[in-house]
C-alpha cells in the first residue's frame, strides 16, 4: 500500500481519485480482514459518497485539506455521530454516538475519509486485543500471533495495508506496543496535545490519542491535523509550533541520545535486545552522541501505573450502569438492574480492574496505595525532567518481547501487564513517545522506542525519522 503522503501526491497529480482509493481500501478489507479481524465495521456507502464529494471539490479547484481523499480508520472508543461506539464491550453493544469526537471532526475537516472502526481490548484494558467482546484480532505478520493492544485493530489495519493511517488511544502503551508487534510506526503525543473529547475514557490523566502509519512522515502529517487546543477539553494544550512532514530533520549530528541502564530487563527476548543494541550502534555511527543514564525510579513505573490506572478506570466506568445508555438488564428491582447490567455487560479483565481500583480508592487504603503512587509518579517525572537536561531524547525497547501466540498469556494477567514495562512511564509523565520498526527477531517485528520532553513532539519525530532513514 502507498503511504498517505504518496496518496496525496497521486491525487494531486490526477493519477488516482479519492473514490478509487477508498474503493480499493474497502475491497481489500472485505477480501482479507476475515482472517485478521482488524475491523468491527466498515462504512462503505458513506465513505464512497464522501470520497465522491472530495473528488468533486478537487475538480472545482477547492482546497480540501491536508488529508483530502485519504482512507483512515478509528478505534472503537472514538465517537462518530450516527455510528456505533462500543469500546469493545458488550455493555455498549448497541450504543450509537450522538456527537463527533474532536478527532473525527478534525480528520473530516482535513478531508480524510473514515472507512470504519477497529477492534480493541474492552475499554482499552489489555495488551493483546483478546479481551474484546466481539472478536480476537490477529497479527497480519503471523496470524497465529497477537497484534498487541489495546489498539491492536488499528495497528493491524495499517500493517495489513488496509489503510495508510489509523488512530488509537494510548493509556499505558496501547499505541506503541501494538505498533512494535505489528511492525509499523505508532506515536503517543504529549498528554494534552491532542484533544480527548469524544474518547471513551479509561484513565483520564493518562489517555492520549495518536496515529499509526507505515512511516514517521505519515505520522507527522497525521499529528499536524489532529493536534491543538480544543474548547471541549480543558486538558488540551496550545501548540506553539507545528512540525509537518516537510520540516522533518533527518540528521543525527549534534543529537544526544540517552540510553537508560534500565532499558534491558531480565527476561526480555534476546533477539529484541540484540536488535535494539544494533539500532543504538547505528545511530552512534551516524553521528549521535550516546549518553548512559541511570534512572532507577523507572523500575517503579509499572506498579505505579497499575495503581493509578485501575483507580481512574473504576471511577470512569461508574457511569456505565444501563440507566441512560447502553445495555440494560430487564429486571424490576433497581439494585438487581445495576448488578446484572454491569455483571453481564463487563468482561473479566474490566471487572478485575474495577475491583482493584475500588479497593485502592477505598477509605482504608487510599493513603497507602493511591496517594503514595501519586508521590512516586511525581518523583519519576522529576527524574526524567532532570535527565532531559543532558539529552535530547531517550531510547529504549518498545516491548520486551515480540508478538506471542494467541491465548498464550490470556489467563495470566501479570504476564500481560509486564508487556507494558517499557511504555507506561511516558504516560505517567505525560511525555511523547514513538515506536519505529528496528528489524526482526524470530521472523517477527521488533520496535525501537524514543521519548522526548513534554511538548517536544517535533524533536521526537526528527529523531525517529533520522533512525528510519538509516533503515532504508
Image: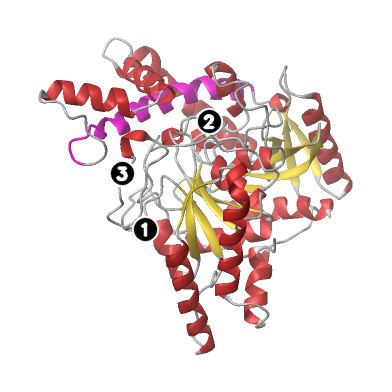
In this view, the residue in front, 409 or 250, is 409
Asked which quadrant contains residue 406, the reply is: top right
Do the CB atoms of the residues marked 2 and 3 lie less than 8 Å apart? no
Report the mark closest to the observer, 3 or 1.
3
Q: Which residue is mark 2?
A: 130
The reply to whether discs 3 and 1 touch (Cβ–Cβ < 8 Å) is no
* N-term mark: 3 or 1: 3
> Which of the marked residues, 1 or 2, is nearer the chain's N terminus?
2
Look at 55% across and 63% down and name the residue there. 71
Q: The magenta stretch spans which residues?
A: 296-324
Which residue, as the protein is rendered here, is positioned at the far bottom? 60
* Dot 1: element: loop
Asked whether residue 3 is drawn in magenta, I would say no
Label at residue 230: 1
Task: Report whether 177 appears left or right of 360.
Answer: right
Locate the N terminus by quadrant: bottom right
- For mark 3, what is the residue? 94
Question: Quick one: SS at disc 2?
Answer: loop
Q: Residues within 10 Å of mark 3 (few under 14, many from 20)?
A: some
- Label 3 to label 1: alpha-carbon separation: 28 Å
Whether residue 309 appears in magenta in the rendering, the answer is: yes
Q: Is residue 390 something that shows in the picture?
A: no
- Above or below residue 258? Residue 309 is above
The mark that comes first in sequence, 2 or 3, is 3
Q: Is residue 283 above or below residue 14?
A: above
Amino acid at each position: 500500500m502507498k503511504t498517505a503522503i504518496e496518496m496525496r501526491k497521486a491525487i494531486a497529480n490526477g493519477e488516482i481519485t479519492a473514490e478509487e482509493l477508498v474503493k480499493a481500501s474497502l475491497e481489500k478489507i472485505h477480501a482479507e480482514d476475515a482472517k485478521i479481524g482488524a475491523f468491527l465495521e466498515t462504512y462503505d456507502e458513506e465513505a464512497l459518497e464522501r470520497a465522491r464529494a472530495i473528488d468533486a471539490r478537487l475538480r472545482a479547484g477547492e482546497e480540501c485539506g491536508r488529508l483530502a481523499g485519504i482512507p483512515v480508520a478509528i478505534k472503537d472508543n472514538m465517537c462518530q455521530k450516527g455510528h456505533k461506539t462500543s469500546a469493545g464491550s458488550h455493555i455498549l453493544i448497541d450504543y450509537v454516538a450522538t456527537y463527533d469526537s474532536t478527532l473525527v471532526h478534525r480528520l473530516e475537516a482535513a478531508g480524510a475519509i473514515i472507512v470504519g472502526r477497529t477492534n480493541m481490548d474492552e475499554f482499552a484494558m489489555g495488551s493483546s486485543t483478546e479481551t474484546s467482546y466481539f472478536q480476537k484480532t490477529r497479527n497480519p505478520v503471523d496470524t497465529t500471533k497477537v497484534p498487541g493492544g489495546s489498539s491492536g485493530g488499528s495497528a493491524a489495519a495499517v500493517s495489513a495495508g488496509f489503510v495508510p493511517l489509523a488512530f488509537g488511544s494510548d493509556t499505558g502503551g496501547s499505541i506503541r506496543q501494538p505498533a512494535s508487534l505489528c511492525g509499523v510506526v505508532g506515536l503517543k503525543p504529549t498528554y494534552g496535545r491532542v484533544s480527548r473529547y469524544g474518547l471513551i475514557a479509561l484513565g483520564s490523566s493518562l489517555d492520549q490519542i495518536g496515529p499509526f502509519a507505515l512511516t514517521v512522515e505519515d505520522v507527522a502529517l497525521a499529528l499536524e491535523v489532529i493536534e491543538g487546543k480544543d474548547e471541549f477539553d480543558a486538558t488540551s494544550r496550545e501548540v506553539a509550533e507545528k512540525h509537518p512532514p516537510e520540516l522533518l530533520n533527518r540528521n543525527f549530528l549534534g543529537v544526544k541520545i540517552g540510553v537508560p541502564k534500565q532499558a534491558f530487563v531480565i527476561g526480555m527476548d534476546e533477539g529484541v535486545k540484540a536488535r535494539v543494541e544494533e539500532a543504538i550502534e547505528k545511530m552512534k555511527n551516524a553521528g549521535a552522541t550516546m549518553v548512559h543514564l541511570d534512572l532507577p525510579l523507572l523500575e517503579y513505573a509499572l506498579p505505579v501505573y497499575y495503581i493509578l490506572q485501575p483507580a481512574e478506570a473504576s471511577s470512569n466506568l461508574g457511569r456505565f450502569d444501563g440507566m441512560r445508555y447502553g445495555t440494560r438488564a430487564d429486571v424490576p428491582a433497581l439494585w438487581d438492574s445495576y448488578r446484572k447490567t454491569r455483571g453481564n455487560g463487563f468482561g473479566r479483565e474490566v471487572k478485575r480492574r474495577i475491583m482493584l481500583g475500588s479497593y485502592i480508592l477505598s477509605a482504608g487504603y487510599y493513603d497507602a496505595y493511591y496517594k503514595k503512587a501519586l508521590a512516586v509518579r511525581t518523583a519519576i517525572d522529576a527524574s526524567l525532567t532532570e535527565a532531559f537536561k543532558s539529552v535530547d531524547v531517550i531510547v529504549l525497547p518498545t516491548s520486551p518481547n515480540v508478538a506471542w501466540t494467541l491465548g498464550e498469556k490470556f489467563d495470566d494477567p501479570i504476564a500481560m501487564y509486564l508487556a507494558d514495562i517499557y511504555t507506561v512511564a511516558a504516560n505517567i509523565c505525560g511525555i511523547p513517545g514513538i515506536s519505529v520498526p528496528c528489524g526482526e527477531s524470530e521472523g517477527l517485528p521488533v520496535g525501537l522506542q524514543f521519548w522526548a520532553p513534554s511538548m517536544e513532539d517535533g524533536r521526537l519525530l526528527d529523531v525517529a525519522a533520522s533512525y528510519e532513514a538509516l533503515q532504508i
